[in-house]
Image: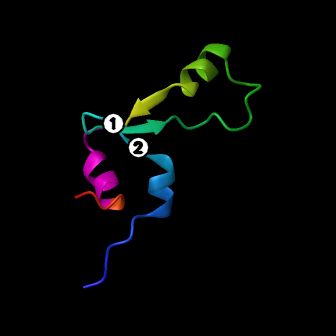
Amino acid sequence: MPKLKTKSSAKKRFKLTGSGKIKRKHAFKSHILTKKETKQKRNLTKSGLVSKVDTPSVLLQLRLK
């Protein structure tokens, strides 16, 4: 059987933490920033974690499960 390939889009967007959680970046920070508040833009800069519901899907895309 051939090797399973990871999804290229997933490997660019997600990283595993040491405890096994999946780190991600927030959306809506790339353009049209003039109408967004400074606080919102600052909070979007920080990284977040993938929710528990979406974790199995991301692990499957990364071929880790």
Query: Is disc 1 placed on a helix, strand or loop?
Result: loop
Locate residue 7 relative to residue 22 in the image: left or right: right
> Is 51 covered by the magenta stretch?
yes
Seen from the viewer's position, the closer of residues 5 and 34 is 5
* Residue drawn at 58 percent across, 26 percent down: 45
Question: Which numbered marker is on residue 17?
Answer: 1
Question: Percent x, y for residue 28?
Answer: 61, 36
Q: Which mark is residue 52?
A: none
Badge 2 crowding class, 10 Å Cα cut-off, few under 14, some 14 to 19, many 20 or more, is some
Q: Position of residue 47 (x, y in %)?
A: 48, 29
The N terminus is located in which quarter? bottom left
Residue range of the region highlighted in magenta in the rendering: 50-60
x%, y% of residue 30?
A: 68, 38
Count the numbered circles shown.
2
> On residue 15, which mark appears?
2
Tell me what residue is drawn at x 61 percent, y 14 percent: 39
Q: Are marks 2 and 1 in contact (CB under 8 Å)?
A: yes
Residue 62: name its quadrant. Answer: bottom left
43 shown above or below 59 = above
User: Quarter of the image holding residue 31?
Assistant: top right
State the separation of the CA atoms marked 2 and 1. 7 Å
**Label 2 SS:** strand
Query: Is 32 or 25 nearer to us in this picture?
Result: 25
Amino acid type, callout 1: Thr
Q: Is residue 60 above or below residue 34?
A: below
| Colour mapping used in the image | rainbow
Type of amino acid at the residue the image marks with label 2: Lys
